Each structure stands twice: as C-alpha cells, then as structure tokens.
Image (cartoon, helix red, strand yellow):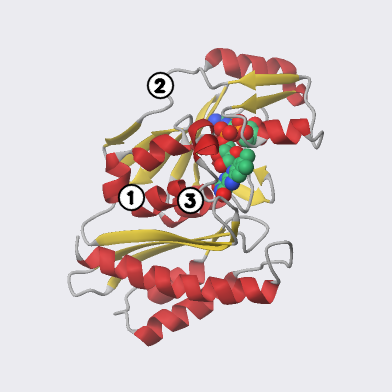
Amino acid sequence: MEDALQLLSKYGDDAKVMAGGQSLIPLLKLRIASFPYVVNISGLKGLNQIVEKGDYLEIGSLTTISELEENDLVKEKYQALHEAAGLIADPLVRNMGTIGGNVSHGDPSNDIPAVIIALKAKLELAGLRGNRNVDADSFVTDSFTTVLEKGEILKRILIPIPGTNSGGCYIKHKKSAGDFSVAAVAVHLRLEDDERVKSAGIGLTSVAPKPLRAVRGESYLEGKKLTDSTVREAAKIVVSESNPSTDFYGSLEFKKKVLGRITEEAIHLSFERAMVR
Ligand SMILES: Cc1cc2nc3c(=O)[nH]c(=O)nc-3n(C[C@H](O)[C@H](O)[C@H](O)COP(=O)(O)OP(=O)(O)OC[C@H]3O[C@@H](n4cnc5c(N)ncnc54)[C@H](O)[C@@H]3O)c2cc1C
C-alpha cells in the first residue's frame, strides 16, 4: 500500500489506479481516457477479506464481485449485497471486477453503491497523510466523480452489522441478462418488536446522475407499521426523489414507473425478511 501511494504521489495526474480493470481497461481501449502510468493494486495483500469485526462487516476493496456473491456470511446476513453481486454483468466480469473498483468508478449505473448506501456503510480511504472515513452516501458526488483525492486509495468498506429483526434486498430491472439496470433499488429495514419500522435505508441505481439515497422515503417509513397504502406512499416519495434521464435504457417516465414498482416490491420483501429474523 505504501509503495502504491508513493507511486500515485510521484506521478500525480499522470497515474491511475487499476484493480480488476473491468471498467478502466474498456475506457483505455476506447481511448475515452489515457494515462501514462497505471498503478496496478490487484496484488496488494490483505485487501480481499470479508470479516465481521466489532460493530462492522469489513470488506477489503480488492474483494472480487464473485467472492462477495459466494461468501456465506454475506449470503446469510447482507441479502441486498449478495443479490446485487449476483446481478452484476457475467461471471467473467465478476471474477475480475472488485467491490472497490465498482464503487470508485462513480458510475450511477453500477450496482454496489446503492447497496452500501442503503446499508449506511462507511468507506475507509488511505492516503500518504493517513486514513479517513467517508459515508457511502457522500462518496460519489456526480457522474464518475467521487470524493477520492489525488493519490488516495479506497481500502475497505465498513458495513454496520445488522441488528435483530433486520432484512433487505436488491431489485434490479434490466433489459436482458448481464445488463446494467433500467432502474434498481436496495432496501434495508430494521423493525421494532411491534413490527414498526425502526430504521430504513434506501439506495437507488440508474435514476439520477449519481447513486442516490432516498432520504425522504426512509424517514417516511420510520416509525410506521407497514400496510399496502404506506408502502405505496413510500414508493411515491422515493420516485419523487429520483431524477432519471431518457436514454438507451428507456424514457424518464418509464424509469420512474419501473422505480415505483420495484420500490414497493423491495419494501414488502425486506419487511418479510426482517420479520423472520
Ligand atoms: C461487460 C460489462 C458489464 C458490466 N455490467 C455491470 C453491471 O451490470 N453492474 C455493475 O455494477 N457493474 C457492471 N460492470 C462494471 C464492473 O462491475 C466494474 O467494472 C467492476 O466492478 C470495477 O471493478 P474493477 O476492480 O474492475 O475496477 P477497475 O476497472 O480496475 O477500476 C475502475 C475505476 O475505479 C478506480 N479504482 C479501482 N479500485 C480502486 C481503489 N481501491 N481505490 C481507488 N480507486 C480505485 C480506478 O482508478 C478506475 O477509475 C460491467 C463491466 C463490464 C465490462
């Protein structure tokens, strides 16, 4: 890590970090971007662990999407993350692509950012001046733009360990298998013993210039008992927080319609999962 940080500092704007290369290499191949130096961090040791420590699940940034998908702890307790990983691209991309690269790329259509937003994760960034933590919902600031400063490397993702009566899911509406989404939503709910929503996390993919936290949808749900009409109303609020644009994947009206439907479904499913835990 120290060597990688030194190289990034030495070459400044001329250098770019590469992990699995699944987003970076296509950009370089298509000449959309060009860098004299690529700092390949894929061999750094100790950054592909998935382990619960203290209050957090720690995921090293070099953990591949396949490792996430296949991890038993993630499968059992972090359903949204498990589901999102399994819906990314195809096995070839998942075997090479890393969670750190998926998040650092800043692509509003990448699936992991919405999930870690819903799970209220923190990101640990390493730099020559030391480490700092950033909340997942403030990490991506605009399309393909993050708070990573020159020379910084995303080291770990820290997800609070879910309490009792918690459940979540990731629902991705896509045109065909392996595709990016038309719209996708991650929901994580924690319930009180009387089934009222204690806390809610909602993250959105592909419906704004950056991955979005649906803050108003979350606060509407908190403190409520869920009925069909409260879930419908929450989904309406979430849609009003989105800001999609018309493109190859559909018109903005279509994306909003899809988002409303999958949000309702995701809240219902998360509620069911939280009830049985
Ligand atoms: C055919 C295809 C289909 C795809 N479909 C999907 C999809 O459906 N859903 C989805 O979410 N993604 C999809 N992807 C994107 C893929 O998931 C990402 O490319 C991958 O997860 C990125 O990880 P990486 O390790 O390959 O990153 P890289 O390509 O190595 O890097 C990507 C960016 O992140 C930066 N970076 C990487 N690691 C770090 C780090 N630790 N610290 C700081 N900066 C870092 C790099 O400098 C670069 O800017 C698809 C990609 C392909 C090629």
In primary-sequence order, the first of circles 1 and 2 is 2
Secondary structure found at label 2? loop
Which amino acid lies under the numbered mark 1 shown in the image of this protein? Tyr
Pointer 2 residue: 46
User: For numbered disc 1, what is the local secondary structure?
Assistant: loop
Inspect the image, locate mark 3, and give the three-letter code of the amino acid beneath it: Leu
Which mark is on residue 78?
Answer: 1
Question: Residue tagged by mark 3?
Answer: 87
Give the number of the mark in front: 1 or 3. 3
**Distance (Cα) linking label 3 and label 2:** 26 Å
Identify the residue at the far bottom of this view. Answer: 229
| Quarter location, residue 256 | bottom right
Asked which secondary structure carries label 3, the reply is loop
Residue 273 position within the rendered picture, expressed as x and y whole percent measured from the top left: 27, 64
Point out the tag, 3 or 2, that comes first from the N-terminus: 2
Residue under the point 44% across and 69% down:
218
Whole-percent x and y of residue 239? 56, 74
Residue at the front extreme?
176
Q: Residues within 10 Å of mark 1 (few under 14, many from 20)?
A: many
Asked if 32 appears above or below 136 in the picture, the reply is: above
Viewer-nearest of labels 3 and 2? 3
**Image coords of residue 77 (percent x, y):** 28, 50
Ligand 1, seen in the image, is in the quarter at top right
The residue carrying mark 3 has its beta carbon less than 8 Å from ligand 1: yes
